[in-house]
Image (tube, rainbow, N blue to C red):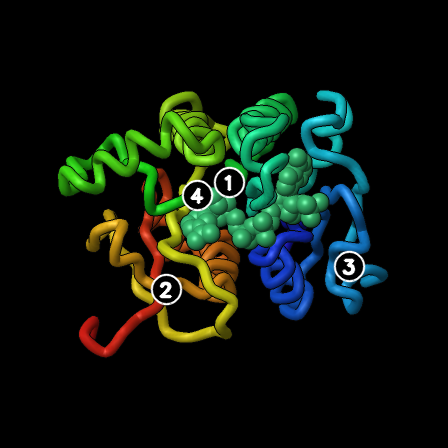
Amino acid sequence: MQTLLILGATGRTGRSLLERRLGQGGRVRAIVRRREGLPESTRNHPRLELVEASVLELSDRELTRYVQDCDGVVSCLGHTLDCRGLFGAPRRLCADATSRVCRAIEENRPARPVRFVLMNSVGVQNPDLEEKRSPFDRGILAFLRRALPPHKDNELAAGRLHRDIGRQSPYIEWCVVRPDTLTDEGLSACRLTASPTTSLLRGRPTARANVARFMIDLVDDDRLWDTWKFRMPVIMDAIDSDA
Ligand SMILES: NC(=O)c1ccc[n+]([C@@H]2O[C@H](COP(=O)([O-])OP(=O)(O)OC[C@H]3O[C@@H](n4cnc5c(N)ncnc54)[C@H](OP(=O)(O)O)[C@@H]3O)[C@@H](O)[C@H]2O)c1
């Protein structure tokens, strides 16, 4: 198990991911703005290398060094849900972090492709598939695109992998994970689909713990990776009627 680079490790999904990875015996490098945001039990963990900085403020040279020897990158970045986080700078947090980290990986020319897993949103379309949305959902998404910068950022971030990196890079393979409505429930069975299956109005609960587990499994499990690489799986908690 090589080192996993985590972006957003102080977030609610990121913390779960970090604890899980360290619990599995893996090595983690995490770029965080404040170490106090990490779970206390992890802050001085011997297998955690902490970089205290905002990912967008690191120089290209620093980023290139921090992605070196990482076989996977997981980004759980998201805008803080207050006025400044939603409408202030940086408006392209997820998209710019994705682009910069990808450039840093390419600069290193790794011998094997690095697996890049991006936490995104069920509200983002997969351009490869004809994902049908109701007129109502299309209206909501058009509104969000104009009114809510984080939604646009999620669309751009997915595009940076889907369009800019594509499927031909010898250095990067990717998966865009699209959770439905996030909750802080514990681990449970989850359901994965290639495209959204319900209206945005009837969002399905999705435990952050399940999202974290799936994103780590993607990096570790070759069969799972082969199933979902270059795709944009939607993840939600399983319910009885899924059986
Ligand atoms: N809410 C939902 O129902 C829902 C549904 C589907 C998808 N999503 C997506 O899920 C992701 C968020 O998941 P979450 O709830 O786990 O996020 P979260 O708890 O809000 O964590 C966000 C992470 O991003 C970091 N961050 C925020 N602003 C930053 C900045 N300017 N520079 C560097 N780092 C910054 C935070 O660091 P600090 O601790 O330093 O602030 C934190 O580590 C988002 O991409 C969101 O669009 C949400």
Closer to the chain start, of discs 2 and 4, is 4
Q: Judging from the image, what secondary structure is the residue with disc 3 in?
A: loop
Expressed as whole percent of the image width and height from the top left, the position of residue 120 reads 44, 43
How far apart, in angstroms, are the residues tagged by discs 2 and 1?
25 Å
Within 8 Å of ligand 1, the CB of disc 4? yes
Q: Does the residue labelled 3 lie within 8 Å of ligand 1?
A: no
Q: Tell me, for residue 205, which label it has, or none.
A: 2
Give the quarter of the figure containing the C terminus.
bottom left
In the rendered image, residue 56, in percent from the top left (x then y), is placed at 68, 28
Q: Distance from label 2 to label 4 (Cα)?
A: 15 Å
Q: What residue type is labelled 1?
A: Phe
Q: Ligand 1 closer than 8 Å to the CB at disc 1?
A: no
Numbered disc in front, either 4 or 1: 4
- Inter-mark Cα distance, 2 to 3: 32 Å
Who is closer to the viewer here, 155 or 229? 155
Q: At 59% across and 43% down in the image, what residue appears?
A: 82
Q: Give how far apart the Cα atoms at labels 1 and 3 are.
A: 21 Å
Pointer 3 residue: 47
Residue 128 in the figure: left or right of residue 32: left
